[in-house]
Amino acid sequence: MSVAVLAFPGSCDDRDALRAVALMGAEPVRVWHADSDLGGAGAVIVPGGFSYGDYLRPGALAALSPAMAAVRELAAAGGPVLGICNGFQVLTEAGLLPGVLRPNAHLQFRFQDVALRVQRESAWLPGVVAGDTLEIPVKHHDGCYFAAPAQLEELDAAGQVLLRYVHNPNGSVENIACVTNAAGNVAGLMPHPEHAVDPLLGSVDGRILLQGLLDQAVAVEAAI
Amino acid sequence: MKVTVTVRPRAGILDPQGEAVRRSLEGLGYAASDVRAGKVFDLDLDVGDAREAVRVAGRIAEQVLSNPLIEEFDVAAQEPVRL
């Protein structure tokens, strides 16, 4: 199974994501933002960083790139797509995920481990159940998740909120840390699973989401 | 044809940047009860007339320059619009 990791000018977590994919036993494929295909990959990670210098709004210009057109196609075909940090911002700006990420409510950068409460069982979270807690680091200035009240009700009702912060680091509405699209195959979060894969650096809870990505890609491939 | 697009946070949306500016103004002794921070885009569009420029700028503002979840915009022609 190969996993595409997008790289925009200004991405900085693409290398860690590539390494994490390899650690998980899959084949990482780096896809430049100007490329219009994903090199045959069955899953995508849109990584963290500051694509296009965060000009206009974080993720807004990256959402218009050729590589994102290929990501849309894969997502429409049911392929799993994981957006991390800036990647989450890109996916919301691309309309592949609901809501938007705004500057942290306190206007300060946050760089710390955060505890995340699992809201429900999901293909993204193999082996964990509602109420479990994951520990994964965040590092961002624009991670305040926002969606209008009516949209939040829809997300709650449809089970699209996978993780909530135990202690909200950025002012996100309803402590939301991770959401999916309606179909469930696109997920985004501000915390960095790719930085939580090696016991040398602390938590390995990031492996859970990455395993979820791989499991779904295998399932989609088997169904074709 | 030159048009100006102004993007600002929607009413009711917390604007931390505007709030930080407001607090700084307070520190200088200015009594501002609210400050909202937005963005201004001056576009020079290759279209026939000002009316068309406003129409195209509106589409650009909706698709790219603003995020409708949190922002609103208005478009003003810098040359007279002939109706």
Image (cartoon, coloured by chain):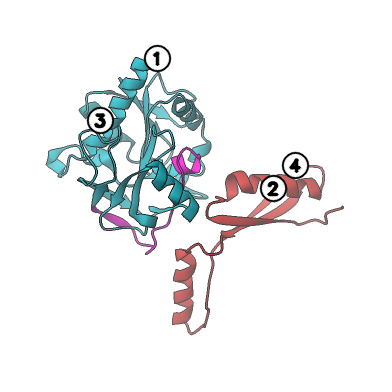
Chain colours: A cyan, B red
Residue A90 on the magenta span? no
Q: Nearer the viewer, mark 4 or mark 3?
A: 3
Report the span colored magenta: A91-114
Q: In which quarter of the image is the C terminus of chain A?
A: top left
The answer for which chain carries disc 1 is A
Position of the N terminus of chain A, as image quadrant, is top left
Residue denoted by label 1: A224
The residue labelled by disc 2 is B57
Q: Quadrant of residue A220?
A: top left
Give the CA distance from mark 2 to mark 3: 44 Å
Q: Which residue lies at the image location 36% right of the left edge and 26% below the top edge?
A: A43
Tell me the CA gap for discs 3 and 1: 20 Å
| Other residues around mark 2 within 10 Å, as few (<14) / some (14–19) / many (≥20) | many
- Amino acid type, callout 3: Gln
Q: Could you confirm whether marks 1 and 4 are on the same chain? A: no
- Neighbours of disc 3 within 10 Å: few (<14), some (14-19), many (20+): many
Residue A211's tag is 3
